[in-house]
Image: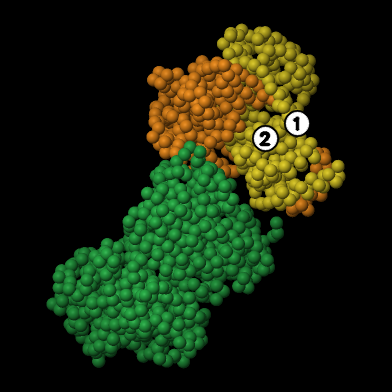
């Protein structure tokens, strides 16, 4: 075996499907001097790839995940390791049938051919299913099975063939050296390599490897049970590994797939079994492999019964033996998403982990592009490791959420579903007051935020006639009609919101202005006391984030961004700080709490507490001033995300409750109510057509398409400017539109309300709408516009559809509901001239 | 006094018995006691000739008209009577099938402990014993303190070594045996129909494991074994998959082999297999995976697919033969 | 034909067996457990004999309560009844084990009638004492044949074969008897789904044994001296053949 090189451009740790894919894509992008280090042997390293069941169902509710899966599918096909078998997701319950209908919408939205089939049609495709135990199936003909070990080998060989890669097996990483926050090298059982880039592709071992560098990869190894049964007489004549569709018995959290003359049965139904990375046995101490842990058969007993019930003819006989059974390890993360990207703690240390076989080549490509250009073709914000805050990098947090995530693997997960474990980590100073007001708390970035206040129940009577209620359980789940009432009370009187989840960064120093100019699209050289709402772009002029920056001094800017984006945005800002240290960033999130005060009576309320002139002239829109409320000095920013007159009040954390009480008392005579994020994030925002990052704004679209472009482009340079100028020369290929649902009545007569993610289709024939780049039209946000009495959807549409009234519909649970384009591009459905805010 | 019980076939002493004598000789010197040998059954005396080269001065010949064929309980009863008669304080046999069986019966009948498959013995309060567990993958330290100590010696712990030749005094002992002692007695023997050497005695063994892939895959291994006058063995994977009969399994639950050269093809080197071949003088591993644990237990290695290496080897051998 | 098979729950390790910190036990925290391989064959043989001759199979073990998993494995492939002699998991020496088993058998026979055949593994995979079956046979005053790799009923006698030298020894004994068997006797079946489900409903009796004092106390466990060798790689692929020839000549096997 050859010697380790002294130096490598990049070291990839782990030769499972992910590491091989990363090596291959980096090589294809021209990287040289790559080293792949593997603790185990090849081709099966003993990691999770070796025991994966290797099937691919392309449809996911998430757009990005589907894109990555489709990319992977294509790569697997190109490698010649994919066999199309079709796949059927089965429903045993009516609730699951509903979920399958919802999956139909997702398959339509992402352009995958699927169909709902009857029990007898299922039986035709897989003749041993007992049709009496199922209600139907969701059939995807393009599903299939890959040889993941072979795929890994081929990808690795490709990188070697490109003269880019050296591979070292039986070599264990013992340390990762870090100098001044940057990777400087690795130590192994076979020697050291100096390198500035390390990619951790170690699956379930990733947290352990990351820890060597002082970084964290928030995943937890979790057991997934799997057995192999046979011989199956019915498969006796099969010559291929798979000739029948893969079955997913969704209601039982199980799958069954043919493997040659055997049947593999896997389960996600058992109790969550967490294994700490340090407790995974070594290769030598493992009976099978480290990730094929001893089977705990009691956990699987109910699944045997379920499998026999589904396939009685095939399985309920003495000859069919359980020939192999394992507690297979896989990686789960706190939010169920993979962990991709450069770690926040250490520069040059990348993670590519918590990935299923079906996504691996796609994420390999994504991270290779990201490492090469800083950008990937497919939007990565949802998988970006830097989305995870400090608290989400602790073992207890990760384990608790992984445990909860486990049973969601095959579960029916509502788009607004809240996590149950590890709650109450971050609370604002108003928390006690909010609890007293019987707030319904939702979590964002660890913060507990009132989504609505049950104390506002009494408002329902006053405002109940403005809009129909959601009567269907699914539509009404994780939602309350109180949200509409809070909204209307705000529009008529005033409401206060807890916005403490905002992330706040102070940028200071002689280079601060140049620095924020570079970061932001919009002109930052404004006078002190002004605020600027601006998108931030990447080099391809796709939207990286959008946020508000206040100029608080000549050399002092304060950035305020959403809690969901704060951790990612912080890394983006930090990564671009000037090398000469002329500007610095301080994270003030934990020092500042925020109350939003909006509604026609907000001025009256705030004015009663301060001597500062709060009039329109004295405190114009977009300005920020330090004011004293009673005896507390705060920053007030005249801005609104809900379309009404008012202020964001930024308060030093410890005075928060005092200021809350001030406002509360001052507001009571004027009808001030507490209002939740349901109004702030959905109803108020949608009436104004304001974009939300991660929904309307993503890396698939540029600011022109999003309707965020200003008439002029500033003369100063900024990230993505070149591409942005180029984009401005062209007509946008898609336009962000505000739509209204024209008829909510379903076939059953019940009114239905969309929740987001649904495809926008042609009304006449339900056809999917796709723009020139293959981007489909789907609902990015949905919710009531109570002031308008309309239900609002937002979606990108190709220009030709924008003015084609009465031609569009939204598909929801396999039914079409007509929609109308109410606003194309920027602009508001409610108060289009912003009179309420600008007075 | 130590009594060392040796098996024999009427012509020759069991080679493991000679290992045991070598070990017991050293032990008796350390314990400052005498070592006397025990041979059971007919024609024992003719086998006994060999003993004189092992530094033994006295051999007890247990003789009884019904002891023509092996009968474990009768043997046990005989040794028990001899132990009592000679006031021996230690009895040891080789850890063969019969040796362990015999000593277990003795232990059961006397309600004494038996330390089977010992590898080291030292003198302490009683006897401090090291014995094999897990086929030798682990060692257990234990002690024997009873007045009569019973043990068997693990195989291949020492090599049989002759010592100064002594005149041997053969002393007959006739036990009193009952019908019941013969309720289990060897009633016949069947020779293996296969001619020639067996796995246990072969000086060259070609082994195949998971990497062979199929029953057909073993053809090249058979051919190689034939070229070199050796025999074929298989790992537990090979026999459990039905590629080879279980009689050809090398391992903890199969055969222990001790050839001059063991050529292991496509075998990763699981613990239970290593136990079966650790007595091989030389091991050559042919495996496509450089990281197979077997490489760290082998003397020689060839990296590569056995289906490529072995045919090349055969044609090379044929060239020079 | 009523058959009792005694099985031992043993860890199922990889190529390296880890010890606990006090070196008094195998560290099983990351290991699965199985029926010792010889005894798996005993269970299979019992099931086959019962399939042929009728009767009922009982499986017995001595160990921690969780050893019921191994009893269930045996029940899943066709045994009918389980007996678990409960211990605290500490090391029981062969004499203690045999006495407890013999007592449990005697007690069980008073309620369920006699067993025709008692089967054991020749030796356990872990402690490898080679004596529990023989001790039980002596305690119950039954004939015993060990190391059996072939057995069948012939004219009311049990004909057993075991390997010896290059051939086989044949023994014939009347029943009841004790037989200890070795792997290779048969190829044990895996449990079926159906059998596994059925096994859940079969009865396991828990027995509290009387523990006599130990005769052979394990003081500690250790690994043998590392025998890792520096392997000499002769070459790669077919190109290595000439080097191998050299080696064969050197070792005088060619």
Where is mark 1, residue-wise? B197
* Image quarter of the C terminus of chain A: bottom left
Q: Position of residue C56 (x, y in %)?
A: 45, 25
Q: Are marks 1 and 2 on the same chain?
A: yes
Give the residue displayed 43% in from the left and 55% down from the top. Answer: A121
Dividing the picture into quadrants, the one containing residue A646 is bottom left
In the rendered image, residue A408, in percent from the top left (x then y), is placed at 39, 57
Q: Residue at x 39, y 84 (%)?
A: A708
Residue B120, above or below A325: above
The label shown at residue B248 is 2
Q: Quick check: can you spot residue A428?
A: no
Give chain A's shade.
Answer: green
Tag 2's secondary structure? helix
Sequence order check: which comes first, mark 1 or mark 2?
A: 1
Query: What element does badge 1 sit on?
Result: loop
Q: Badge 1, how many Cα within 10 Å: few under 14, some, many 20+? A: some
Chain that appears yellow? B
Query: Which residue sits at x=78%, y=15%?
Result: B167
The residue sitting at 68% across, 51% down in the picture is B288
């Amino acid at each position: 075996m050859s010697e380790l090189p002294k130096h490598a451009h990049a070291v990839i740790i782990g030769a499972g499907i992910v590491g091989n894919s990363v090596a291959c894509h980096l090589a294809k992008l021209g990287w040289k001097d790559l080293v792949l280090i593997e603790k185990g042997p090849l081709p099966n390293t003993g990691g999770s790839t070796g025991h994966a069941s290797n099937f691919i169902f392309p449809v996911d509710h998430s757009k990005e995940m589907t894109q990555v899966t489709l990319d992977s599918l294509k790569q697997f096909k190109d490698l010649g390791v994919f066999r199309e078998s079709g796949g059927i997701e089965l429903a045993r319950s009516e609730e699951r049938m509903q979920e399958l209908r919802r999956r139909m919408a997702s398959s339509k939205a992402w352009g995958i051919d699927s169909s709902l089939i009857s029990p007898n049609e299922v039986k035709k495709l897989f003749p041993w299913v007992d049709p009496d135990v199922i209600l139907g199936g969701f059939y995807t003909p393009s599903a299939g099975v890959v040889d993941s070990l072979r795929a890994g080998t081929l990808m690795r060989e490709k990188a070697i063939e490109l003269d880019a890669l050296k591979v070292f097996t039986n070599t264990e990483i013992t340390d990762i050296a870090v100098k001044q926050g940057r990777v400087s090298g690795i130590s192994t059982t076979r020697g050291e390599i100096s390198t500035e880039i390390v990619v951790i592709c170690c699956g379930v071992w990733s947290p352990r490897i990351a820890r060597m560098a002082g970084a964290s990869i928030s995943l937890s190894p979790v057991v997934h049970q799997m057995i192999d049964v046979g011989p199956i007489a019915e498969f006796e004549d099969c010559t291929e590994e798979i000739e029948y569709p893969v079955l997913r018995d969704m209601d039982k959290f199980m799958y069954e797939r043919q493997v040659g003359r055997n049947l593999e049965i896997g389960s996600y139904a058992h109790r969550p079994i967490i294994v700490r990375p340090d407790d995974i046995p070594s290769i030598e101490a493992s009976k099978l492999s480290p990730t094929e842990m001893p089977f705990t058969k009691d956990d699987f007993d109910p699944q045997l019964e379920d499998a026999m019930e589904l396939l009685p003819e095939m399985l309920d006989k003495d000859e069919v033996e359980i020939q192999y059974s394992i507690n297979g390890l896989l990686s789960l993360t706190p939010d169920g998403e993979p962990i991709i990207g450069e770690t926040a703690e250490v520069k040059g240390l990348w993670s590519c982990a918590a990935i299923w076989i079906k996504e691996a080549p796609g994420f390999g490509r994504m991270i290779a592009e990201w490492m090469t250009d800083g950008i990937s073709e497919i939007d990565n914000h949802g998988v970006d490791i830097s989305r995870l805050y400090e608290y989400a990098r602790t073992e207890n947090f990760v384990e608790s959420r992984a445990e909860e995530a486990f049973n969601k693997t095959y579960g029916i997960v509502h788009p607004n579903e809240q996590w149950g474990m590890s709650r109450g980590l971050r609370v604002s100073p108003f928390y006690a007051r909010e609890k007293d007001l019987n707030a319904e708390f939702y979590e964002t970035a660890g913060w507990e935020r009132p989504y609505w206040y049950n104390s506002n129940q009494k408002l329902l009577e006053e405002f109940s006639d403005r809009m129909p209620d959601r009567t269907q359980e699914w539509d009404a789940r994780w939602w309350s009609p109180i949200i509409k009432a809070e909204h209307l009370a705000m529009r008529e009187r005033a409401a206060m919101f807890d916005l403490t989840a905002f992330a706040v960064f102070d940028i200071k120093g002689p280079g601060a202005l140049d620095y924020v100019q570079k970061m932001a699209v919009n002109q930052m050289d404004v006078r002190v006391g002004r605020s600027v709402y601006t998108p931030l772009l990447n080099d391809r002029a796709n939207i990286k984030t959008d946020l508000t920056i206040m100029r608080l001094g000549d050399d002092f800017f304060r950035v305020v961004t959403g809690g969901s984006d704060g951790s990612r945005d912080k890394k983006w800002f930090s990564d671009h700080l000037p090398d000469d240290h002329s500007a610095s960033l301080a994270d003030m999130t934990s020092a500042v709490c925020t109350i939003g005060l909006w509604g026609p009576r907000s001025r009256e309320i705030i004015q009663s507490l301060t001597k500062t002139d709060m009039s329109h002239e004295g405190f114009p829109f977009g300005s920020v001033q330090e004011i004293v409320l009673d005896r507390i000095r705060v920053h007030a920013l005249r801005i609104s995300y809900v379309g009404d007159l008012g202020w964001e009040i930024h308060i030093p954390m410890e005075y928060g409750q005092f200021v809350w009480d001030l406002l509360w008392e001052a507001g009571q005579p004027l009808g001030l109510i507490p209002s939740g994020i349901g109004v702030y994030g959905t109803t108020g925002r949608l009436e104004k057509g304001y974009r939300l990052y991660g929904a309307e704004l993503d890396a698939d679209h540029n600011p022109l398409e999003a309707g965020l472009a200003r008439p002029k482009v500033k003369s100063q340079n900024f990230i993505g400017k070149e591409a942005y100028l180029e984009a401005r020369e062209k007509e946008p290929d898609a336009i962000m539109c505000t739509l209204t649902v024209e008829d909510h009545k379903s076939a059953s007569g019940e009114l239905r309300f969309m929740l987001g993610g649904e495809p926008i289709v042609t009304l006449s024939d339900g056809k999917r709408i796709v723009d020139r780049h293959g981007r489909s039209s789907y609902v990015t946000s949905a919710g009531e516009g109570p002031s308008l009495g309309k239900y609002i959807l937002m979606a990108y549409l190709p220009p030709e559809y924008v003015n084609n009234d009465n031609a569009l519909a939204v598909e929801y649970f396999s039914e079409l509901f007509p929609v109308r384009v109410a606003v194309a591009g920027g602009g508001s459905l409610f108060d289009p001239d912003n009179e309420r805010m600008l007075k | 006094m130590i009594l060392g019980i040796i098996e024999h076939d009427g012509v020759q002493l069991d080679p493991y018995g000679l290992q045991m004598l070598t070990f017991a000789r050293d032990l008796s010197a350390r314990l400052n006691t005498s070592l006397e040998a025990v041979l059971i059954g007919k024609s024992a005396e003719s086998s006994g000739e060999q003993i004189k080269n092992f530094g033994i001065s006295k051999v007890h010949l247990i003789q009884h008209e019904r002891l023509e064929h092996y009968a474990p309980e009768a043997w046990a009863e005989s040794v028990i009577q001899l132990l009592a008669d000679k006031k021996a304080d230690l009895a040891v046999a080789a850890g063969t099938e019969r040796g362990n069986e015999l000593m277990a019966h003795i232990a059961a009948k006397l309600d004494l402990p038996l330390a089977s498959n010992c590898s080291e013995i030292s003198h302490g309060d009683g006897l401090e014993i090291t014995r094999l567990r897990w086929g030798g993958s682990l060692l257990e330290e234990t002690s024997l303190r009873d007045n009569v100590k019973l043990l068997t010696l693990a195989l291949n712990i020492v090599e049989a070594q002759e010592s100064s030749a002594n005149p041997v005094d053969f002393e007959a002992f006739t036990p009193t045996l009952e019908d019941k002692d013969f309720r289990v007695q060897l009633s016949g023997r069947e020779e293996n129909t296969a001619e020639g050497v067996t796995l246990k005695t072969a000086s060259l063994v070609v082994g195949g494991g998971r990497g062979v892939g199929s029953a057909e895959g073993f053809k090249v291994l058979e051919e190689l074994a034939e070229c070199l006058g050796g025999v074929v063995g298989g790992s537990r994977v090979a026999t459990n998959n039905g590629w080879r009969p279980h009689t050809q399994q090398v391992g903890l639950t199969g055969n222990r082999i001790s050839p001059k050269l063991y050529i292991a093809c496509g075998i990763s080197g699981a613990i239970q297999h290593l136990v079966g071949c650790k007595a091989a003088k030389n091991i050559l591993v042919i495996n496509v995976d450089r990281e197979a644990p077997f490489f760290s237990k082998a003397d020689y290695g060839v990296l590569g697919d056995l289906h490529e290496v072995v045919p090349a080897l055969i044609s090379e051998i044929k060239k020079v033969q | 034909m009523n058959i009792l098979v005694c099985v031992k729950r043993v860890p199922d390790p990889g190529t390296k067996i880890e010890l606990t910190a006090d070196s008094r036990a195998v560290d099983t925290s990351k290991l699965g457990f199985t029926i010792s391989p010889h005894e798996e064959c005993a269970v299979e043989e019992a099931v086959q004999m019962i399939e042929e001759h009728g009767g009922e199979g009982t499986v017995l073990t001595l160990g921690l309560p969780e050893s019921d998993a191994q009893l269930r494995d045996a029940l899943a492939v066709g045994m009918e009844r389980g007996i678990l002699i409960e211990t605290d998991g500490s090391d029981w020496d062969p004499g203690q084990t045999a006495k407890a088993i013999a007592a449990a058998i005697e007690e069980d026979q008073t309620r369920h009638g006699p067993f025709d055949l008692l089967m054991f593994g020749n030796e356990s995979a872990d402690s490898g004492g080679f004596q529990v079956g023989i001790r039980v046979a002596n305690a119950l005053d039954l004939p015993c044949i060990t190391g059996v790799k072939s057995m069948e009923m012939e004219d009311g006698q049990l004909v057993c074969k075991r390997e010896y030298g290059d051939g086989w020894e044949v023994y014939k004994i009347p029943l009841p008897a004790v037989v200890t068997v070795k792997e290779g006797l048969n190829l044990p079946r895996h449990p079926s789904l159906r059998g596994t489900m059925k096994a859940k409903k079969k009865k396991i009796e828990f027995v509290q044994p009387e523990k006599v004092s130990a005769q052979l106390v394990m003081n500690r466990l250790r690994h043998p001296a590392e025998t890792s060798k520096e392997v000499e790689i002769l070459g790669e692929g077919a190109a290595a053949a000439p080097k191998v020839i050299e080696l064969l000549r050197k070792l005088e096997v060619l």
